[in-house]
Amino acid sequence: MAAVPQDRSALPAPAPIHQLHHYAYRARDAEETRHFYEDILGLPLYHIIQSDHVPSTGEYCPYTHFFFRLQDGSFIAFFDLGDDQACEPSPNTPKWVNHISFRVDSIQALQDMKARLEAHGVEVLGVTDHHIFHSIYFFDPNGVRLELTAQLADEFQMLQESRTAHARLREWTARKEQWRQERAAGKGDAPLKPQQNDRPELVKR
């Protein structure tokens, strides 16, 4: 383990992180996954790595690691471990929480992809209005929840949003610390609710 400098002011500045390189999941079957991402979603299969040992840990685990390329040069990638097993869902997390979202150019593109997915037998939720973007949701053959998003807000609006993000998170953190103290004192175990509701129209459903 590398030594941590005692004087943090001597640390180098964070390196610029330009974009996502890849996000990796476990795949039940490589060809099933290729068909979904390449033939249906249109992401080309671009790179494959195969080995029987894991480079980072050295452990024995045969795998085929394969990558699909997005328009910006980033990738979504998968590991087929040769055992016909897919990822199991997290037992303490709702299915809608863990997901990855890909951006498309327009609302029309979103609607076109919805029609394409449904024609291939894929169940699609949406189009969902998130105010600053619209989305559709669906699962890949491995149980990975995916989202396609058409951005509506421009860069100026997103910049305005960014100016309140830290303050809102600080408010949440302060309230969460108070919630933890009350919970430790046995004053209730209900989940913490946010200080404001950005989707009040959903409460009326």
Image (cartoon, rainbow, N blue to C red):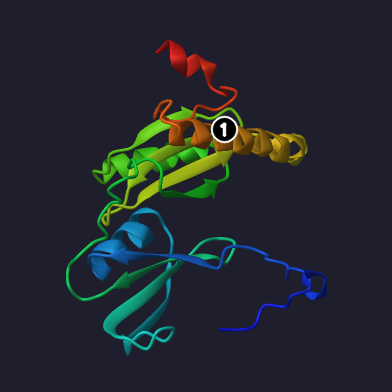
What residue is rendered at 63% in x and 63% in y? 19
Q: Quadrant of the C terminus?
A: top left
Picture coordinates of residue 163 (x, y %)? 77, 38
Picture coordinates of residue 134 (x, y %)? 52, 33
Residue farthest right in this picture: 9
Q: Looking at numbered disc 1 in the image, what kind of residue is underneath it?
A: Gln
Q: Look at the image and tell me whether residue 1 can be seen.
A: yes
What residue is rendered at 59% in x and 23% in y? 196
Residue farthest left in this picture: 84
Q: Quadrant of the N terminus?
A: bottom right
User: Where 95 sits versus 38, above or below?
Assistant: above
What residue is rendered at 57% in x and 67% in y? 73
Q: Nearer the viewer, residue 54 or 181?
A: 181
Q: Look at the image and tell me whether residue 158 can be seen.
A: no
Picture coordinates of residue 46 (x, y %)? 44, 74
Residue farthest top in this picture: 204
Element at label 1 = helix
* Quadrant position of residue 177: top right
Picture coordinates of residue 55 (x, y %)? 42, 87
User: Where 29 sits versus 10, above or below?
Assistant: above
Quickly name the residue at label 1: 178
